[in-house]
Amino acid sequence: MQPFKFRTVSRDIALAGIASVVDANIAFDRAEALKHNKLFFSGDHWNSGIFWMGPTPAQSDPTYTDVRAEIKRVFCSRNVIAEVINNQRDGVLGTEPAWSFVRTEEVTEANPLTPEQEALIAEINSAATIWWDERGITQLLKDCHDEAALGESVSLRLYIPRGRLRQNAVTGAYEIPQGNFTEQLERIFAQKCLTDEAGQLVEPESQTKCAVYSETRSNGDTWLEIVFPEVDAQGQVQTVMRVVSTTNGVETETVYSWDLGGRLTINHLDMDTLITQQVRENQMSINLQKTLQNRNGVAGGFVERIITDGMPPGRYVPDPKDSTKKVYQVAPFRVGAGTTNFIRAAKYEESDGQDGSVRYGKPDVHYREPTSPNTFIDAKRDFYQDILEETGQTHTLTNGDAVASGESRKQARATFKKRLDGVKAAIDPLGRWLLETVVVMALLFAERRAEADNIRCDFGCIVDTGPRTAEEQKADGEAVKDGRLSVETAMTRDSIEDPGAERGRVDGERESSLEVRKQRAELMKTFKDAGLDVRSAALAAGFSEEEANRMVATPAPEPKEPAIA
């Protein structure tokens, strides 16, 4: 097979890079699964009755419409799919990722940072932090995670909106205006792209990747980006972008080449789907059990009774049509606490040929006790546990289980951490690429490209498996004392976002406390020299009552005269 030539690849083949993602990763049944996953996640667990697992009449049955309407009216659900996605997302991105730009070469005593390098890194970290916050990158990564967990093929795209460019008065082409590093950084935006918007082609022989982005605007115009690395005549890797656009049916192509070190402006999030068919099936089973439990509660609270061979309360009154006869007039039937009703036996005539033979029935009440709610509660819990096991989150079940042993909690948390580590391994490279590429682009457009050669971004999501038990925290404290665990690692396990800054605050408070006590001691000495007793001097200097009482020395016993023999 001949390798792709990305410079000349046709529009149709480029678009196939997006279609190949759809065809290979999400065939028709998986496209339906993605659609269903999104409905579940958004809270639509009815979906016109498609997600109902219980029995319903055949569509040809005259009661079909009424029965379906009644089921929908009492339908009850619990969004466990959203719960497990949120748990996984918050376990990796609940705390803002830790990142900073550093020098590519290791900093050592023999090779320390130069003042120029320190100034450059400080400038980049400051500007990139502002860009990160203004563009809402943490939330953007969370959205990417959610889409990927549902089964989407997710990519991130860096771009400059047309409104941030300058149009050449002669050629009509849009160009990047001049500006400093911060100004160029502010021009760049990040966009989340889904399955039908972005994809990639791979050159078979070298496995070089080419990113593709396609957009169809509301007026019918199209925009296609084909981005790939290419070695120039000097042997340097350039980033080439071919823009194929149509305006009013006229197709034009523009080629851009930038020295980004081969970094593409589009990157793919390679993360496993969380919501599988098994999760969906158990979600629908939970909804069925909740609906049945709801219906059973109604049946238990409003018991249906059938009375046989009995007449409702009432009395005989003259027949308005025949004064020689009487008819039975039904009286109101009252129910509820404190009410009493008398049921009259039904009267009927026998049909055995004996005229005037009258018999009375034996009134009886028939009703059915509701099913125990434990049936539905146990079933729900079983299906819920199946979902947690499928997604590696059984630790959320043992958190509320008093009988779960410490070892089972530890194993469940370890399973969840492995799952989160896999998600972290997918998001970390994407975050690192995002920050490094946007900074290199800004430095290039600010004509400071050479300064980007010796910097890189350290990026890492902070994994948080949830609240830790007192026993686990105590074990970490003992490990720190024994030298088997660093203080910063213990702080990270306790969800402290910046252990270094926290240690600085602790040390500062300790030093401040020592300084205050030193000042109080000097002040106390002054008061004592002025004639105050120890306790009064301590209180005047700012010590507490308890501290002052402890400072009062017990008078030494008077020495006794030696006995004279």
Image (cartoon, helix red, strand yellow):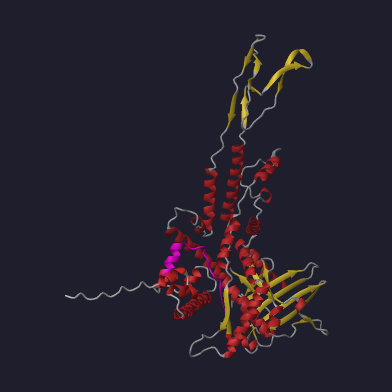
Q: Nearer the viewer, residue 296 or 37?
A: 296
Which quadrant: the N terminus? Answer: bottom right
Q: Nearer the viewer, residue 481 or 449?
A: 481
Rendered location of residue 398, percent (x, y):
48, 56
Q: Residue at x 75, y 80 (%)?
A: 254
Q: Total number of numbered labels? A: 0
Residue farthest left in this picture: 565
Rendered location of residue 68, percent (x, y):
68, 43
Q: Examine the rendering and report whether any part of residue 265 can be seen.
A: no
| Image vertical order of residue 518 relative to residue 411, above or below | below
Q: Residue at x 62, y 61 (%)?
A: 150
| Image vertical order of residue 280 relative to residue 224, above or below | above
Q: Residue at x 43, y 59 (%)?
A: 406
| Image vertical order of residue 521 relative to residue 290, above or below | below
Residue 299: image quadrant is: top right
| Image vertical order of residue 354 relative to residue 156, above or below | above
Q: Is residue 25 magenta?
A: no
Residue 91: image quadrant is: bottom right
Q: Nearer the viewer, residue 435 or 317?
A: 317
Q: Examine the rendering and report whether any part of residue 395 can be seen.
A: yes
State the extent of the magenta-drawn residues as a range.
457-477
Q: Nearer the viewer, residue 459 or 517?
A: 517
Q: Residue at x 59, y 56 (%)?
A: 81
Residue 240: image quadrant is: bottom right
Rendered location of residue 513, percent (x, y):
49, 76
Rendered location of residue 199, percent (x, y):
66, 70
Which quadrant: the C terminus? Answer: bottom left
